[in-house]
Image: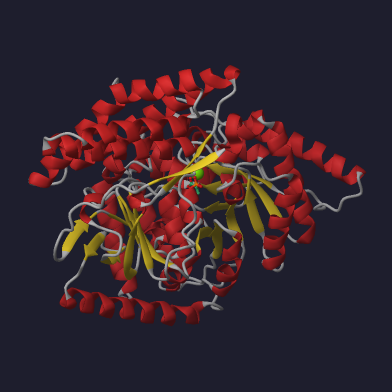
């Protein structure tokens, strides 16, 4: 086996002076640091010979990578159209050339021949072929043709990244204060970012409610995503400001601009510090109604932060973190240890653990053949559907949860439920796992943990009264509920402006689910991203929810909003809002109410 290092593409000509890029500000705050542009990094390619019987599978793997690459370049073309001036034209030509190469070019044919004839693994075949093609271009007299060699190289690197998927190693080698810039940043990438070291990040692709955005908020990393033209306009080592609140990236800022942002950053830090005084204050409205505030956790290391922010429990623990950035599946023991640590860390406060919710935009390479992406991943074998098909996966998770439940209060939450039968199936599976563990003398939760349902599919909201008969509690997932109700991909920047939880259809579904839970007298919470945005607090509570779960960093501001809220007035305003048909009018009614409330009116 031979390891070969491919070199980085040559840096584009250095642009001069301050440059400003606009995108979606998805995680608030200001980061000031030095950029690390990931796409310019080196890739390690391993070379080996494929067994004769596996050549067809290798070819298929390569074709999937080609398709994925075509999709990415297609998206970049869409973004490039929104840049103005000659840069757009230039980028457009470049991307068109990339697409041509990825379609039936001699480059693709050459790579396929190497896989077929020499039984070369796909990554090595790509590197060998682009090496040769680029060499031929480099020998040409015409400067234009010579520059095409660079493009071949870039196409090759994209193919290799898509073949290896986990092409990007951790960010551990970066200096503290680094700002990561990339074409696309996945939730798994974000899980590798240590906020002590990474100051913030920016990417060309991605939508505001993507899991990457959620991870950024939970790590407290200022982030701007969906930024057209970013990669060509920034180099590793540039000074950069990420304004995650305003959705702006400033490269090589002037001294004046830097000074202004430094002052704004200090003011934000002062405000955050002043809100820490609320840590031990109960979230009670002005007219005496108490609201439970819990934390959404993405990573176990957040337990300390949740306690420091005064969270009364964990309202949503996304177990996906256990399956990210690895090639094997965690077994029951490993999952048990991770969950037990969190339950113990929360010291008697309830922990709501959700079964695996991968699929859609949350892909885990560890699931390998268990998770084959279909045409419409968000509508495919995702979340509970995958768990119920892969029973071993579900049993290992349930076993770990039941065992962790012996250390403190634990609830089990099921994602993407659409039918009563799914809940019954899981309850039955839980009983079988419990019996097995008891027979072995293993300590488990007694009584068995409550089993809850995420209300995040419109059909589940509409069938909430039926689901309330089989569920012990509900958690409204407004992120997916908005996506599925409005048919807007939450991770797709091209339709991000249409994503609106204040659409009357979304609100009616939320109201319907709340009323079903109240009638059935089962607890209901809301754990989508709107729970962590003080702008929505009055409306959600006005609709009858008394339990919110959110990213830890959002907790103090939401609590502050509740302390300033008159619950009776919020309930009346929610009634008026629910009579509206127009989301613009709803927004205005809510914003007016918030302004009056925070002004003490
Ligand atoms: C949701 O969909 O609102 C939710 C909380 O789950 P996730 O964001 O993990 O899909
Ligand atoms: Mg969801």
Q: Which of 540 and 273 is in front in this view?
A: 273
Q: Where is residue 131 in the image (x, y as percent from the top left)?
A: 34, 35
* 429 in relation to 558, above or below: above
Whether residue 71 is visible, yes or no, is no
Quadrant (top left/top right/bottom left/bottom right) for the N terminus: top right
Q: Quadrant of residue 467?
A: top right
536 lies left or right of 520:
left
Quadrant position of residue 176: bottom left
Left or right: 505 with respect to 353?
A: left
Q: Residue at x 24, y 26 (%)?
A: 100
Q: In which quarter of the image is residue 429?
A: top right
As drawn, is 484 to the left or to the right of 130? right
Image coordinates of residue 219 in percent, x first then y, are: 47, 63
Task: Give the image location of residue 180, x and y in percent.
Answer: 37, 59
Seen in the picture, residue 129 relative to 475 is either above or below; the reply is: above
- Figure disc tally: 0
Most distant residue in the left direction: 85
Q: In this view, does 494 lie to the left or right of 63?
A: left
Residue at image location 64% in from the left, 51% down from the top: 353
Asked which colour scheme the image uses, the reply is secondary structure
In front here: 599 or 351? 351
**Closer to the camera, 596 or 584?**
584
Q: Is there any visible trace of residue 412 in the rendered image?
A: yes
Quarter of the rendering occupied by the C terminus: bottom left
Q: Where is residue 191 in the image (x, y as percent from the top left)?
A: 51, 55
Q: Residue at x 44, y 54 (%)?
A: 214
């Amino acid at each position: 086996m031979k390891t070969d290092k491919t070199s980085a593409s040559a840096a584009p000509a250095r642009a001069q002076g301050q440059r400003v890029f606009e995108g979606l500000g998805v995680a608030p705050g200001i980061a000031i640091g030095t950029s690390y542009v990931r796409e310019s990094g080196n890739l390690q390619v391993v070379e080996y010979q494929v067994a004769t019987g596996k050549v067809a599978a290798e070819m298929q793997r390569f074709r999937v990578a080609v398709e994925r690459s075509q999709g990415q370049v297609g998206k970049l073309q869409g973004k490039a159209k929104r840049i103005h001036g000659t840069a757009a034209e230039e980028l457009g030509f470049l991307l068109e050339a990339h697409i041509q190469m990825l379609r039936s070019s001699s480059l693709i044919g050459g790579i396929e021949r190497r896989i077929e004839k020499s039984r070369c693994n796909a990554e090595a075949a790509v590197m060998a072929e682009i090496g040769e093609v680029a060499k031929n271009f480099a020998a040409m007299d015409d400067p234009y043709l010579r520059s095409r060699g660079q493009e071949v190289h870039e196409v090759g690197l994209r193919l290799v990244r898509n073949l290896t998927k986990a092409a990007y190693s951790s960010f551990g080698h970066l200096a503290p204060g680094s700002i990561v810039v990339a074409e696309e940043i996945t939730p798994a990438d974000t899980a590798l970012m240590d906020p002590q070291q990474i100051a913030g990040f920016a990417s060309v692709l991605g939508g505001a409610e993507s899991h990457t955005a959620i991870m950024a908020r939970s790590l407290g990393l200022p982030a701007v995503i969906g930024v057209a033209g970013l990669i060509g306009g920034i180099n590793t080592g540039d000074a950069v400001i990420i304004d995650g609140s305003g959705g702006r990236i400033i490269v090589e800022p002037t001294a004046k601009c830097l000074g202004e942002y430094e002052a704004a950053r200090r003011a934000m830090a002062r405000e955050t510090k002043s809100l820490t005084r609320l840590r031990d204050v109960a979230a009670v409205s002005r007219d005496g109604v108490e609201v439970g505030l819990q934390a959404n956790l993405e990573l176990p290391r957040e337990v300390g932060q949740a306690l420091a922010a005064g969270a009364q429990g964990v309202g949503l623990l996304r177990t996906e973190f256990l399956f990210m950035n690895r090639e094997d599946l965690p077994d029951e023991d490993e999952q048990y240890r991770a969950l037990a640590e969190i339950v113990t860390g929360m010291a008697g406060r309830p922990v709501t653990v959700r079964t695996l919710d991968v699929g859609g935009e949350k892909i885990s390479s560890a699931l390998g053949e268990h998770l084959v992406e279909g045409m419409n991943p968000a509508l495919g074998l995702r979340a509970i559907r995958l768990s119920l098909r892969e029973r071993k996966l579900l049993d290992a998770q349930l076993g770990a949860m039941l065992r962790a439940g012996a250390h403190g209060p634990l609830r089990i939450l099921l994602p993407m439920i659409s039918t009563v039968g799914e809940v019954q199936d899981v309850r039955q599976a839980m009983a079988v796992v419990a019996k097995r563990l008891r027979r072995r003398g293993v300590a488990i939760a007694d009584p068995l943990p409550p089993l809850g349902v995420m209300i995040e599919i419109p059909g589940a909201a509409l069938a909430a009264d039926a689901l309330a008969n089989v569920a012990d509690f509900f958690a409204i997932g407004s992120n997916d509920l908005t996506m599925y109700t409005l048919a807007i991909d939450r991770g797709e920047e091209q339709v991000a402006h249409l994503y609106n939880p204040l659409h009357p259809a979304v609100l009616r579904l939320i109201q319907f689910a709340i009323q079903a839970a109240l009638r059935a007298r089962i607890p209901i919470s809301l754990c989508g991203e709107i729970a962590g945005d003080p702008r929505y607090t009055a409306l959600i509570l006005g609709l009858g929810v008394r339990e919110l779960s959110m990213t830890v960093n959002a907790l103090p501001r939401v609590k502050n909003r509740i302390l300033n809220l008159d619950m009776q007035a919020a309930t009346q305003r929610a009634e008026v809002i629910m009579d509206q048909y127009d989301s613009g009018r709803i927004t205005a009614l809510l914003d007016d109410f918030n302004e009056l409330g925070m002004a003490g009116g």
